[in-house]
Amino acid sequence: MKSKSPIIPQRVRRITGSFSWLDHRLLHLGFLHRMQPEEMLLYFFLVLVGDRNGVSFYGYDTICTILKLTAEQLIHARNRLIDMSLIAFQDSRYQVLELPDETKTPEPSHCYQPPPHSHQTLSMREVLEKALQHNNR
């Protein structure tokens, strides 16, 4: 039988100052299996930076810089997480949502299509227009 005791007991993680956690159901309900790497990265980032209600206010430029994503990749990942009912987004505010019940786990509204690989730089206006187009669907 394998020991469950910590390898380095003096370094056991503790919640201090800020607050975040990942629900094991993220794995057990198949969400991780359905996510692409950019979606996992964005979800983990939003969990990390969210307050106790899961709310955060990081802007596109900052998120793209920290996560090393293009604006297109960010928007695509964000929209997929919204489709899976894992996050909400409104007026540059994100909220990590409580995971849907196992029986109500929604399938994404469309199959995954990776964003086109382009070295084209989008203006903030173009990024926002794409975001508004998705929110108006």
Image (spheres, rainbow, N blue to C red):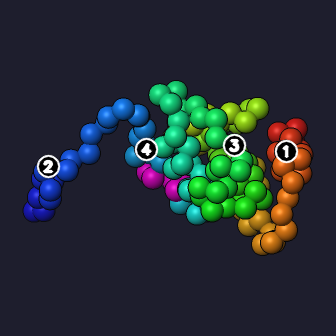
Image: 133 above or below 15: below
Secondary structure at badge 1 equals: helix
Q: Is residue 13 visible?
A: yes
| Image position, residue 36 (x, y; %) | 61, 62
Q: What residue sits right under mark 3 in the picture?
A: 59
Q: Residue 10's mark?
A: 2
Earlier sequence position, callout 3 versus callout 4: 4
Query: Three-letter amino acid code at disc 1?
Result: Leu
Sequence order check, earlier mark of 1 and 2: 2
- The residue where tag 4 is placed is 22
Amino acid type indicated by mark 4: Leu
- Which stretch did the figure color magenta? 27-32
Closer to the camera, 58 or 133? 58
Among numbered discs 3 and 1, the one appearing first in the sequence: 3
Please tell me whether mark 3 or mark 1 is closer to you in this view.
3
Residue that carries the numbered disc 1 in the rendered image:
128
